[in-house]
Each structure stands twice: as structure tokens, then as C-alpha cells.
């Protein structure tokens, strides 16, 4: 069986809003509903696990009633960190379960079905896969003294989600103690010495973080 864990623990501070960013409406519906719908549209049999802070769960259930949102999903308590939240989501999957699990940011509502499929297909073959994009801007390395130098952008990629893994592999990875360099799920898996494959992401798969992103989101919905 395959799963998707959608992590939604944002507080909306960079949005300049008291409303957590996953609940901000775009196109008349909360961001999080758009995100969940993307995965349900890709595969209605995909088991959806939603990781939310316990303090936000009653509000979310109220939103689901208001919007008549009936896509099945399991709600799991979020942790103090992204690492803990992902680990809590994984704990909702039986230890003897075979299959794949993706982890996705709740505020990335525009991931395409093509990218989701590519990630699951690559993970089926190679156990771990992430969507990436080429860097189009010039980028610069800044050293500890405040100096810097240009680096070759062709050597770098922008990383998106969903990041998809063999279930047993990801559970083993998340049994490791937390390390500061664990910036995403792929970095946790790589700490085991495992290879992570890359597939092409989609440009629209932006993470909604700022008020400008919301303006872009409204345009994308149109």
C-alpha cells in the first residue's frame, strides 16, 4: 500500500497573518484542501496522512464541515520540528507495511500529477526519489567572513516535494537521532548512506510562504 504524509505545521508569520498559512483561502478554499485534492486526484487509493499541530485540528475539522470536504485522511499530531512531525506521520503506518510513502509540504498546492507519478515510479525502482528543478538565477557562496564568490548554477538543483521512499527505508532513516543538517527527508535518508534519485519537478509547485506567493497562487488557479 502507498501513502502520502502531508506536513502542515506553519504559523503564517511570514504571511503577515494570524491565520496559519495552510488555512489561508485561495480560490475560495483553504490551501491545504487544494494540496490534499492533488494527491487524491492522482490516486484515490493513496492513503493520506495529515500531520497538524494538535491545537489546529478542531479548526481544520470545522473547515472540512464548512466546505463539505470529504476526501478521507488520517490526522496525526505534529511535532515541535519538521523532523518530529514527519516521524509522527510515519508512526501512523504499520511497521510491517510494504510499499511507498511520500512526504509533502502542506503549502505546496500546485504539484502536478505527472511529478507525483514520476516520484512514486522512481522510488519503486530505486527506493528514494525527489523532484528537483534547475537553478535559473546566478547564485553566490557566502563564507564565514562575509565574503563570497559566484558558483556554477549548473552544479545545483532546487529541491521540491513530494519526496518518496520505500516505507521500511524511511522508517529506518527516521530512527536516527536528529541532526542539524537534516533539512528535508532526503537528507535523513542520505545519512544512512543511501542514494536518492532525482526526477524533474514542475515550476508551479511553489511553497506558499509570503503574501507575494498568495498572489501567484491566485493566478495559477485561474
Image: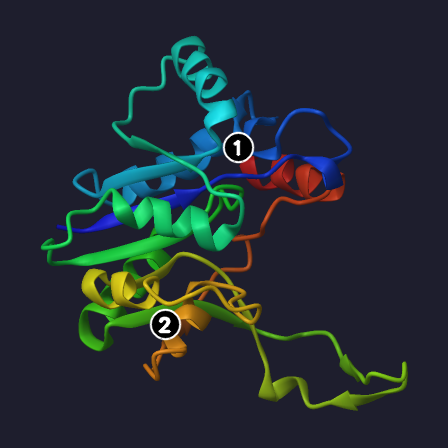
Judge whether 143 appears above or below 70 on screen.
below
Left or right, 135 with respect to 118, comes to right
Judge whether 218 appears above or below 27 on screen.
below
- What is the x, y in percent for residue 112? 41, 51
Which of discs 1 and 2 lies nearer the camera? The answer is 2
- What is the x, y in percent for residue 82? 50, 51
How many numbered tags mark residues here? Answer: 2
Q: Residues within 10 Å of mark 1 (few under 14, many from 20)?
A: many
Image quadrant holding the C terminus, namely top right
- Give the residue pinned by disc 2: 189
- What is the x, y in percent for residue 28? 55, 20
Left or right, 215 with respect to 41, comes to right
- What is the x, y in percent for residue 91? 27, 47
Left or right, 98 with respect to 180, comes to left
Q: Residue at x 36, y 13 (%)?
A: 68
Quarter of image, res 51: top left
Label 1 – label 2 distance at C-alpha: 28 Å
Q: Residue at x 53, y 32 (%)?
A: 31
Whether residue 26 is visible, yes or no, is no
Mark sitting on residue 31: 1
Judge whether 40 appears above or below 33 on screen.
below
Q: Secondary structure at mark 1?
A: helix
Q: Residues within 10 Å of mark 2 (few under 14, many from 20)?
A: many
Q: Secondary structure at mark 2?
A: helix
Q: Residue at x 51, y 67 (%)?
A: 182
Q: Residue at x 37, y 36 (%)?
A: 50
Amino acid at each position: 500500500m502507498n501513502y502520502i504524509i502531508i506536513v502542515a505545521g506553519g504559523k503564517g508569520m511570514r504571511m503577515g497573518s494570524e491565520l496559519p498559512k495552510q488555512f489561508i483561502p485561495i480560490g475560495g478554499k483553504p490551501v491545504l484542501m487544494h494540496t490534499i485534492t492533488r494527491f487524491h486526484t492522482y490516486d484515490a487509493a493513496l492513503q493520506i496522512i495529515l500531520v497538524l499541530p494538535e491545537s489546529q485540528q478542531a479548526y481544520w475539522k470545522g473547515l472540512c464541515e464548512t466546505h463539505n470536504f470529504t476526501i478521507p485522511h488520517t490526522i496525526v499530531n505534529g511535532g515541535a520540528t519538521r523532523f518530529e512531525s514527519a516521524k509522527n506521520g510515519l508512526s501512523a503506518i504499520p511497521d510491517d507495511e510494504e510499499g511507498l510513502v511520500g512526504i509533502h509540504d502542506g503549502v505546496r498546492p500546485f504539484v502536478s500529477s505527472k511529478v507525483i507519478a514520476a516520484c512514486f515510479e522512481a522510488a519503486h525502482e530505486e527506493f528514494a526519489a525527489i523532484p528537483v528543478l534547475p537553478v535559473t538565477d546566478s547564485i553566490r557562496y557566502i563564507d564565514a567572513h562575509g565574503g563570497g564568490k559566484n558558483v556554477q548554477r549548473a552544479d545545483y538543483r532546487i529541491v521540491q516535494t513530494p519526496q518518496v521512499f520505500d516505507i521500511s527505508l524511511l522508517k529506518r532513516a527516521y530512527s536516527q537521532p536528529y541532526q542539524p543538517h537534516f533539512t528535508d527527508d532526503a537528507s535523513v535518508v542520505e545519512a544512512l548512506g543511501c542514494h536518492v534519485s532525482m526526477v524533474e519537478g514542475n515550476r508551479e509547485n511553489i511553497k506558499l510562504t509570503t503574501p507575494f506567493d498568495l498572489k501567484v497562487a491566485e493566478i495559477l488557479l485561474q
